[in-house]
């Protein structure tokens, strides 16, 4: 599956570049008699490392986000704006997660599923990606309003804003992800990619802009919240809240900052695509190798957000912990009742047999 943050350069025996190749692997095709750059070790690392860790992310994400949806639907007021955000975030992370198995397959075997599937998978993946980012920004802003102005209508549970906000978030995500559907193609040796470097760069800078906006909102809102919590009149639970906020910020920046720095640096290599000098190409290749290793690793940290979101935005809350305990207790009681019912049926059956034998 193509991503907008990587790219491929093809070096042939005539030392030309094809700008319309894979944006995910920076893979070189070359004639063995005129070897310019050998990235076999990088590709082997990606083909092993990526599927293994993406498989772990998929399993944890499915478990955590489905659990969130069940708890919110069963125990919470769906008209609440807070719960609307949580529900939409869980759905968004699940949408994002659906693209990861295809990506793992792509790293192992190339894209063999056809162009319609290439377009659909890229589109669904990016809808999940952008909707998750937008929702995290809105949730941070909502939390800021709740602390700074707790009597605001936005904080109330009447839910006047829930439906319009949900519609706007998903409409904006679909619009932002639409280039991935329109401009991706299957090219070359089974590459599911953007058709040209312009749209590859567009995808990279979209992600960079989302990160910068998210960072500004995070830093501003949470710094103001921390200042409010440090006020002498703040509630007693402020230490726990401060630890949570600090954890959220650390996880956000550790996850997303390296990834966005790497994909931005990768985008700079597009400037070398017009070169026809094999020595310059070899220099680009050698410089890029550490960056590509960094990309594979930083991407896993970034994409882990789909299973970390339920942990930090839902289950750290006392309310959701209680809901989870209640649900587990209810499941335990149901199992016990089923077992007792089975026991009674067994006893009745045995008793009936004894009466017949008499």
Image (cartoon, grey):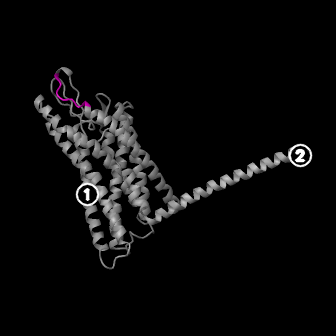
**Quarter of the view holding residue 87:** bottom left
Relative to residue 347, is residue 271 drawn left or right? left
Q: Which mark is residue 6?
A: none
Q: Say few, some or many: other residues with alpha carbon within 10 Å of mark 2 (under 14 / 14 to 19 / 20 or more).
A: few
User: Label 1 neighbourhood size at 10 Å, few (<14), some (14-19), many (20+)?
Assistant: some
Q: Is residue 203 magenta?
A: no
**Residue drawn at x 18%, y 25% as measured from the top left:** 35
Q: Is residue 164 above or below residue 295?
A: below
Residue 135 shows in this picture: yes
Residues 327 and 144: in front is: 327
Local secondary structure at mark 2: loop
Whether 36 is among the magenta residues is yes
Residue 305, given in percent of the width and then of the height, sits at: 35, 52
Q: Which residue is mark 2?
A: 358
Q: Is residue 347 above or below residue 145?
A: above
Label 1 vs 2, first from the N-terminus: 1
The magenta stretch spans which residues? 34-40
Residue, disc 1: 213
Q: Is residue 345 left or right of residue 166?
A: right
Q: Nearer the viewer, residue 156 or 305?
A: 305
């Amino acid at each position: 599956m193509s991503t907008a943050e990587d790219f491929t350069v093809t070096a042939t025996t005539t030392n030309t570049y094809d700008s319309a190749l894979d944006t995910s692997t920076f893979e070189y095709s070359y004639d063995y008699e005129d070897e310019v750059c050998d990235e076999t070790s990088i590709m082997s690392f990606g083909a092993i490392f990526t599927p293994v860790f993406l498989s772990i992310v998929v399993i944890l994400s499915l478990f955590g986000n489905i659990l969130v949806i069940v708890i919110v639907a069963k125990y919470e007021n769906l008209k609440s704006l807070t719960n609307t955000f949580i529900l939409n975030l869980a759905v968004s992370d699940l949408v994002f997660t659906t693209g990861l198995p295809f990506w793992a397959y792509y790293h192992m075997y190339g894209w063999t599923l056809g162009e319609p599937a290439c377009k659909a998978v890229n589109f669904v993946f990016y809808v999940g990606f952008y909707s998750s980012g937008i929702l995290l920004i809105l949730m941070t802003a909502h939390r800021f309003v709740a602390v700074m102005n707790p009597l605001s209508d936005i904080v109330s549970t009447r839910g006047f804003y829930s439906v319009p906000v949900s519609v706007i978030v998903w409409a904006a995500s679909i619009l932002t992800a639409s280039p991935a559907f329109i401009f991706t193609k299957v090219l070359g040796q089974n590459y599911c990619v953007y058709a040209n470097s312009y749209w590859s760069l567009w995808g990279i800078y979209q992600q960079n802009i989302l990160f910068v906006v998210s960072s500004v909102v995070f830093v501003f809102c949470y710094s103001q919240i921390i200042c409010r919590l440090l006020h002498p009149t703040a509630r007693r639970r402020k230490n726990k809240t401060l630890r949570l906020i600090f954890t959220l910020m650390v996880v956000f920046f550790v996850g997303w900052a390296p990834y966005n720095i790497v994909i931005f640096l990768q985008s700079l290599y597009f400037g070398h695509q017009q070169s026809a000098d094999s020595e310059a190409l070899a220099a680009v290749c050698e410089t890029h190798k550490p960056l590509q290793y960094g990309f594979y690793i930083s991407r896993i940290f970034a994409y882990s957000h789909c299973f970390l979101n339920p942990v930090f935005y839902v289950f750290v809350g006392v309310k959701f912990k209680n809901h989870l305990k209640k649900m587990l207790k209810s499941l335990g009681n149901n199992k016990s009742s089923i077992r007792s019912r089975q026991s009674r049926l067994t006893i009745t059956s045995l008793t009936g047999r004894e009466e017949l034998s008499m």
